[in-house]
Image: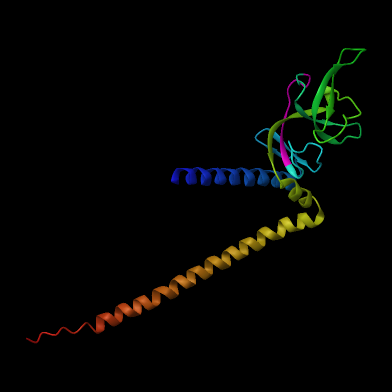
Amino acid sequence: MQFRKWIGSALTFLMSVAFFTVAGSVVLSRVSGSEPNFYGYQLKTVLSGSMEPSIPTGSVAAIKPGGDMTRFNVGDVITFRSGDNKLITHRIIEVTQDEQNGQVLYRTKGDNNDSADSELVHPANVTGVYTGFNVPYVGYFLSFAGTKTGNVTLLIIPGILLFLYAVVTLWKAIASLEEKKPEANQSQSDTKHPDVIDAST
């Protein structure tokens, strides 16, 4: 029983560490203006429900960039740029070829969509492949962080938290000193007035 409880606590701790590490990495990337990434993986915000339940709405998905973009097979989930330059993450449902030059092309579809995407995807437009790892809900926060209100909030909240931490630390230090004073006074009183021992026989 204790072992199961320990395993549960350890898993919860590791998931929390992963959540805050990825979220912090994305936030820092957004603040610096660079592409959000984590140890070579691109972190993409998913605010569409087209890939549910594989990739929940509002999550941040880890995408592995680079490599031969013609290597993918049916079932792989890729991130690509559409004709209007939007980033889309959908699953490959068919690998075909251009009839004129034999170039590999991908037909894609969102898991939650009724029909396939209207345009075939050229490998040159593929930016990476979904690794299967995502962090739920962080995307909502990042979407808010990208607004003017969010940028101001990200600057103000850390300052407020640091101030509150300083106040709490100071209060605890003062309370600790107040607790020690009565103990010191009691010790002095015991020294001046030792217990009387009845030595009568």
Q: Residue at x 10, y 84 (%)?
A: 199
Q: Residue at x 69, y 46 (%)?
A: 28
User: Residue farthest to the front?
Assistant: 1
Front residue of 3/194: it is 3
172 in magenta: no
Q: Is residue 77 above or below residue 139?
A: above
The x and y percentages for residue 49 are: 80, 41
Find out whether residue 61 is within the magenta segment. yes
**Quadrant position of the C terminus in the picture:** bottom left
Most foreground residue, 129 or 49: 49
Up the image or down, 142 lies above or below 174; here it is above
Identify which residue, 63 or 137, lies in the foreground. 137
Q: Position of residue 7 (x, y in %)?
A: 50, 42
**Magenta region: which residues?**
60-70
Residue positioned 85% across, 17% down in the render? 96
**Percent position (x, y) of residue 160?**
66, 63
Furthest-left residue in this view:
201
Image quadrant occupied by the N terminus: top left
Residue 113: quadrant of the picture: top right
Residue depicted at x 81% and y 36%: 112
Left or right of 50 in this view: 84: right
Residue 4 % position (x, y): 48, 43
Toward which corner of the image does residue 118 lie, by quadrant?
top right
Q: Nearer the viewer, residue 167 or 46?
A: 46
Instruction: Tally the marks.
Output: 0
Above-or-below relation of 128 to 165: above
| Colour treatment of the image | rainbow
